Amino acid sequence: MAAKDATAIHEEFGGDRLPPGQRRTDRFPVLSKSGTPSWDVETWRFTVTGAVEDDLDLSWSAFLDLPAETQRQDFHCVTGWSRFDNEFTGVTFPTIADEAGVTDDAVHVLFRSMDGYSTDLPLSECMREEVLFAWELDGQPLPSDHGGPLRVVTPHRYAYKGAKWVTGVEFLTEPRRGYWEQRGYSASANPWNEERYDTW
Ligand SMILES: Nc1nc2c(c(=O)[nH]1)N[C@H]1C(S)=C(S)[C@@H](COP(=O)(O)O)O[C@H]1N2
Ligand SMILES: [Mo]
């Protein structure tokens, strides 16, 4: 599948390709709050709940039947490294939102993962083609340390906004903070503004 180039996203935020305070690496470090969870293709489910017309509850094969695309994207970790030109294959967030039918009162989104991780974003920050539920990296199944079988990627935000091992999306009628957001990391997480931490 030919990759769409999403690496010019920094232009929208008026910044350089390498955001301030970041250094480029060709390695792909693993950052997880705890270990890598195991999964079973027979029992894995992906659910969409909350402010939607139809809840979704998809098996692995049903998820893979959704329309997919490949995008070349950059990845910015809040700890200071950026990795350019990752080719992720998956389903866009707007595709999932359309499947479920988001209701007018939805303003925010909470992603949930198999390891107990969660992260949140305003709905408007999710309704972008670049927000992918990805199962392949550079043409290979997404490595389990990097969130396989399925993770979210958010090239317009620091990478903690992309839930690895994602299994649930909840549409919310008011904001709720995720795992790192409750522990002081920025709710907005724009790398070009260096939104790393929130102070209360
Ligand atoms: N489920 C889950 N997703 C997660 C995390 C986690 O601990 N658990 N860590 C986040 C953080 S802090 C970062 S920087 C990226 C790291 O992704 P990587 O390990 O593929 O580099 O995943 C994010 N998504
Ligand atoms: Mo992180």
Image (cartoon, rainbow, N blue to C red):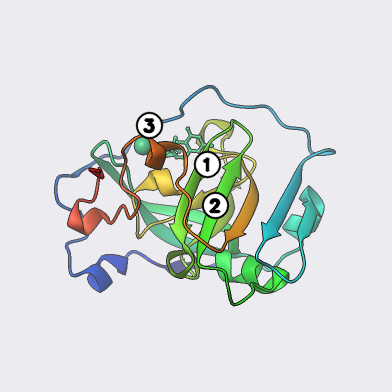
Residue furthest top in the image:
35
Q: CA distance from mark 2 to mark 3?
A: 25 Å
Look at label 2 and name its amino acid. Answer: Leu
Name the residue nearer the viewer: 118 or 91. Answer: 118
Q: CA distance from mark 2 to mark 1?
A: 7 Å
Can you identify the residue that label 2 sits on?
Answer: 110
Snapshot quadrant of residue 57: bottom right
Look at label 3 and name its amino acid. Answer: Pro
How far across and down, in percent of the image, does residue 37 sit? 63, 27
Q: Compared to 144, does 154 lie above or below?
A: below
Q: Residues within 10 Å of mark 2 (few under 14, many from 20)?
A: many
How far across and down, in percent of the image, does residue 125 sit? 42, 65
Q: Are marks 2 and 1 in contact (CB under 8 Å)?
A: yes
Residue at 21% in and 58% down: 192
Snapshot quadrant of residue 31: top left
Specify the label residue 118 is tagged with. Answer: 1
Q: Earlier in the sequence, mark 3 or mark 1?
A: 3
Residue at 64% in and 35% down: 114
Q: Earlier in the sequence, mark 2 or mark 1?
A: 2
Please indicate whether residue 115 sits to the left or right of residue 157 in the image: right
Q: Are marks 3 and 1 in contact (CB under 8 Å)?
A: no
Can you identify the residue that label 3 sits on?
Answer: 29
Name the residue nearer the viewer: 156 or 103. Answer: 103
Mark 2 or mark 3, which is nearer to you? 2
Look at label 1 and name its amino acid. Answer: Ser
